[in-house]
């Protein structure tokens, strides 16, 4: 056998041995992420979009190496357990969700599937994690430190309406952190010599009843705490506030975009984008309990000057100068 013939036979054998392995080498693992939404796909598009963009920044492409399984509670927190069970049955690699009720529901449902929580007000105080630096278990993510923001929202209202004495506060009585927050709001209001009219609601019907009482009590302003229930029903809330010429400060800029006066809080879209970082770390093998929970990197004050004019209010220059965005 000539040297050339031996070389040809060796090359052919090499091709036969390696050929079956080539397609396997080209295959990429398909990760599954469960996205548990509090509202609907349409109403949370502004949050899902940044999250998906963040994932793309880390090299995850839907349909190639990633599949996102969406489940929507449509503002009904009692649906969480069923929706979470569906995601677990699909064997998702990570669950991502926002807010305290959803995070607590996932914590109750599983200790094995990693959870990346977003915008949870007080994850330590509500027992979701052991500490921010060492959350432990299967949970990590981002906190909105909402309990520290409502006093600042009251101060903003006082700056815009110096004579303000009575303020209505909407909070979700089904959300454990909200009970804590509304008590903190009451304490902050006392320091500012304001009277709080507290309305704990859980449903659209509860909102309607609260509105009827607010009309009778005639407070000077409205404070809506940070809960996805109110984001879901933002049109209903803003239709009421505008109809009754009720100035307000809100946790979500979306209410200001619909005609509200002011919002102050972290960038929720930015927090959802940052959630992709935690997902990437977990998919690459990190233990979620070892990843410190992050606080917001920045806060936004959004002011609607058109709404101020309609209410007959003048926004002081000291407030305008602090605004991240002014809607003309």
Image (cartoon, rainbow, N blue to C red):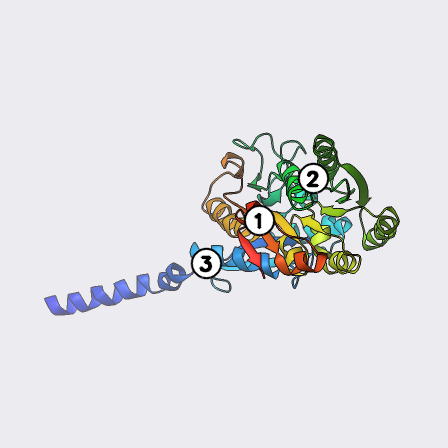
Q: Nearer the viewer, mark 3 or mark 2?
A: 3
Q: Taking 43 as reference, is 84 above or below it? A: above
How far across and how far down the image is residue 324, in percent? 53, 51
Of pointers 1 and 3, the one earlier in the residue sequence: 3
Tell me how far mark 1 sits from mark 3, CA to CA. 29 Å
Residue furthest to the left: 2
Tell me how far mark 3 sits from mark 2, CA to CA. 30 Å
Please, what secondary structure does the residue beneath circle 1 have?
strand
Q: Are marks 1 and 3 in contact (CB under 8 Å)?
A: no
What residue would you read off at disc 3? 56
Q: Taking 173 as reference, is 212 above or below it? A: below
Q: Are marks 3 and 2 in contact (CB under 8 Å)?
A: no
Quarter placement of the C terminus: bottom right
Tell me how far mark 2 sits from mark 1, CA to CA. 35 Å
> Can you tell which mark lies on residue 116?
none
How far across and how far down the image is residue 26, in percent? 38, 62
What residue would you read off at disc 2? 108
How far across and how far down the image is residue 256, in percent? 65, 56
- Residue at 53% x, 37% y is 293
Q: Nearer the viewer, residue 128 or 137?
A: 128
Q: Nearer the viewer, mark 1 or mark 3?
A: 1
Q: How many marks?
A: 3
Please, what secondary structure does the residue beneath circle 3 have?
helix
How far across and how far down the image is residue 192, in percent? 70, 33
Q: Nearer the viewer, residue 326 or 2?
A: 326
> Can you tell which mark lies on residue 301?
1
Of pointers 2 and 1, the one earlier in the residue sequence: 2
Q: Residues within 10 Å of mark 3 (few under 14, many from 20)?
A: some
Say whether residue 106 is visible: no
Say whether residue 78 is visible: yes
Quarter placement of the N terminus: bottom left
Please, what secondary structure does the residue beneath circle 2 have?
helix
């Amino acid at each position: 056998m000539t040297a050339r013939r031996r070389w040809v036979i060796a090359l052919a054998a090499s091709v036969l041995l390696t050929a079956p392995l080539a397609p396997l080498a080209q295959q990429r693992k398909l990760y599954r992420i469960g996205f548990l939404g509090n509202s609907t796909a349409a109403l949370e598009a502004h949050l899902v979009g940044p999250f998906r963009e963040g994932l793309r920044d880390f090299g995850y492409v839907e349909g190639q190496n990633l599949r996102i399984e969406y489940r929507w509670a449509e503002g009904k927190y009692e649906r969480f357990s069923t929706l979470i069970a569906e995601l677990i049955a699909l064997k998702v690699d990570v669950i991502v969700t926002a807010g305290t009720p959803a995070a607590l529901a996932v914590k109750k449902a599983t200790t094995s599937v990693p959870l990346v929580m977003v915008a949870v007000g007080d994850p330590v105080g509500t027992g979701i994690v052991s500490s921010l630096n060492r959350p432990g278990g299967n949970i990590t993510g981002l906190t909105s430190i909402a309990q520290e923001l409502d006093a600042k929202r009251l101060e903003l209202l006082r700056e815009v309406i110096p004579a303000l004495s009575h303020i209505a506060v909407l909070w979700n009585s089904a959300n454990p952190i909200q009970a804590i927050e509304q008590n903190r709001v009451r304490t902050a209001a006392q320091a500012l010599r304001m009277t709080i009219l507290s309305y704990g609601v859980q449903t659209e019907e509860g909102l309607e009843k609260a509105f009827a009482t607010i009309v009778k009590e005639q407070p000077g302003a409205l404070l809506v705490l940070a809960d996805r229930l109110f984001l879901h029903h933002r049109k209903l809330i803003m239709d009421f506030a505008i109809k009754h010429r009720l100035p307000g400060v809100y946790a979500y800029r979306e209410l200001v975009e619909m005609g509200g006066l002011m919002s102050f809080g972290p960038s929720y879209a930015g927090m959802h984008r940052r959630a992709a970082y935690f997902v990437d770390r977990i998919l690459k093998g990190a233990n979620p309990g070892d990843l410190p929970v992050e606080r917001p990197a920045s806060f936004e004050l959004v002011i609607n000057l058109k709404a101020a004019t309609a209410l007959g209010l003048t926004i002081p220059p000291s407030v305008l100068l602090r605004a991240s965005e002014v809607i003309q």
